[in-house]
Image: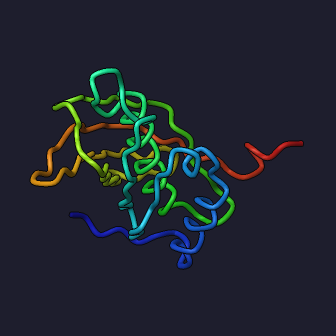
Amino acid sequence: MQNFTPSNPDFEKMVQEKIKGNHFTHFIGFDVHTITPGRVEGSMRLEEHHLQQMGFVHGGVTATVSDIVAGFAAFSLVAQGQGVVTVELKVSYLNPGKGHTLKAIGTVIKPGSKLHFCESELWVIGDESEVLIAKSSSTMAILNKSDYERK
C-alpha cells in the first residue's frame, strides 16, 4: 500500500462533506466508513433491489460502487476547491456475488496533477464466505470548482 500526502490537510472532513451531498450513494445504501489518503472503504447491506434475476449482485450496482470508492479515493488527494469526475471505468466481473453485504475498497495507484489512476476491489460477504466478485481500474480527472459550478 502506498502512502500519499493529501493536498488538503482536512481531506477526511472534505471527503465526508462531499459524501453527504452524493445523493445516489445514499439512495443505494452505500456507506463509506474508512477514509485515508488515496484509499476509501465502505459497505452496504444487500437488498433484493440490488440483485439481478438469478439472485446475484447486479452488474450495475457493482460498477456503481466501484466508481464510488475509486472516485472518493481520488478526491481524498485533491486540493480544497477541486473535484474529480470519472473519465474511464473498466470493471472485471470475477465471480457471481451472493451474500448479505457488499464491501468495497478504492485506491489511488498513481496520482497526477490532472488525472488520478485508481483501482477498486468488491467483495461479497456471506454467512460463511467472503468472495472477491470484481476489480476495476479507472481514471479520474481533476477539475477546479470554477469548472463545474453552475453559472
Q: Position of residue 4 (x, y in %)?
A: 35, 68
Instruction: Tell me, yes or no, if residue 15 can be seen here.
Output: yes
Question: How many discs appear?
Answer: 0
Q: Residue at x 74, y 43 (%)?
A: 148
Instruction: Tell me, yes or no, if residue 109 can be seen here.
Output: no
Q: Quadrant of residue 131?
A: top left
With respect to residue 30, does 65 lie above or below?
above
Q: Position of residue 115 (x, y in %)?
A: 47, 44
Q: Position of residue 133 (x, y in %)?
A: 21, 38
Q: Is residue 7 left or right of residue 40?
A: right
Looking at the image, which residue sits at the far right?
151
Q: Residue at x 77, y 49 (%)?
A: 146
Q: Quadrant of residue 79?
A: bottom right
Most foreground residue, 116 or 43:
43
With respect to residue 43, does 15 lie above or below?
below
Q: Quadrant of the C terminus?
A: top right
Q: Residue at x 38, y 60 (%)?
A: 40
Looking at the image, which residue sits at the far bottom?
9
Most foreground residue, 149 or 96:
96
Most foreground residue, 55 or 62:
55
Q: Residue at x 31, y 30 (%)?
A: 91
Q: Position of residue 52 (x, y in %)?
A: 36, 25
Q: How is the image coloured?
A: rainbow
Q: Is residue 141 left or right of residue 33?
A: right
Looking at the image, which residue sits at the far left?
128
Q: Is residue 60 left or right of residue 107?
A: right
Q: Quadrant of the N terminus?
A: bottom left
